[in-house]
Amino acid sequence: MSATNEELERVLHREGITLASIKKRAMAFMIDEVLLSFLLIVAMWDSFIKASDAQEMILLTNQYLFEYLLIKIAYQTFFVMQYGATLGKMAMHIRIVDTQTMDNPSFLSSLNRAIFRVISEMFFYLGFIWGMMDAMRQTWHDKTASTLVIDA
């Protein structure tokens, strides 16, 4: 059972916790995306240098899209479950907490969040846009996983 916005606001106020800003979340997102893209390029370097033009590079990248999505899900799940934050979020001094415990999300909650994060990306980032308009700044993946992103 998830907490209502009023209940969450009371807990945040009582504990002196502030929600992470949209700007910090966006910067953390960019850091994570650049890091994962860099790792993809390193892993596929031999293939990339054989490509004769940008079109071949795009086709090559598309061939491994499913594997890349699995890596993103594994990365998000592991870091959120283990540390409450991805490397990008750590750099921005923000973290993810379960709305019930105000602690790191469980494995299933972290996996749920990671999967719905990728789904949101596939649907033109609509889940992220939703979070910009939500009172508690919860994206689709935060809503489905019952998580909040707070200042660390």
Image (cartoon, rainbow, N blue to C red):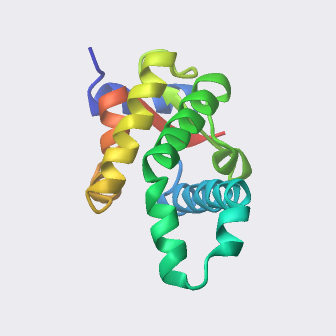
Q: Nearer the viewer, residue 132 or 85?
A: 85
Drawn side of residue 3 relative to residue 112, left or right: left
Residue farthest to the bottom, as pictured: 53
Question: Which quadrant would the N terminus be assigned to in this image?
Answer: top left
Q: Is residue 70 above or below residue 28?
A: above
Q: Quadrant of residue 28?
A: bottom right
Q: Percent x, y for residue 151?
A: 61, 43
Residue 39 location in percent, x, y?
69, 54
Q: Is residue 68 above or below residue 142?
A: below
Residue located at (31% from left, 34% from top): 143
Question: In the rendered image of this protein, does residue 82 appear above or below residue 5?
Answer: above
Residue 109 at x, y percent in the picture: 43, 22
| Viewer-closest of 8 and 78 | 78
Task: Identify the residue shown where x is 36% and y is 55%.
Answer: 121
Foreground pick, 137 / 35: 35
Could one spot residue 77 in this view of the protein?
yes
For the point 52% across and 28% down, the residue is 97
On-image quarter of the C terminus? top right
| Residue 130 drawn above or below residue 45 | above
Where is residue 145 drawn, in percent x and y? 37, 27
Question: Is residue 18 visible in this depiction of the protein?
Answer: no
Q: Residue at x 30, y 42 (%)?
A: 140
In the picture, measured across the screen, residue 72 lies left or right of residue 108, that is right
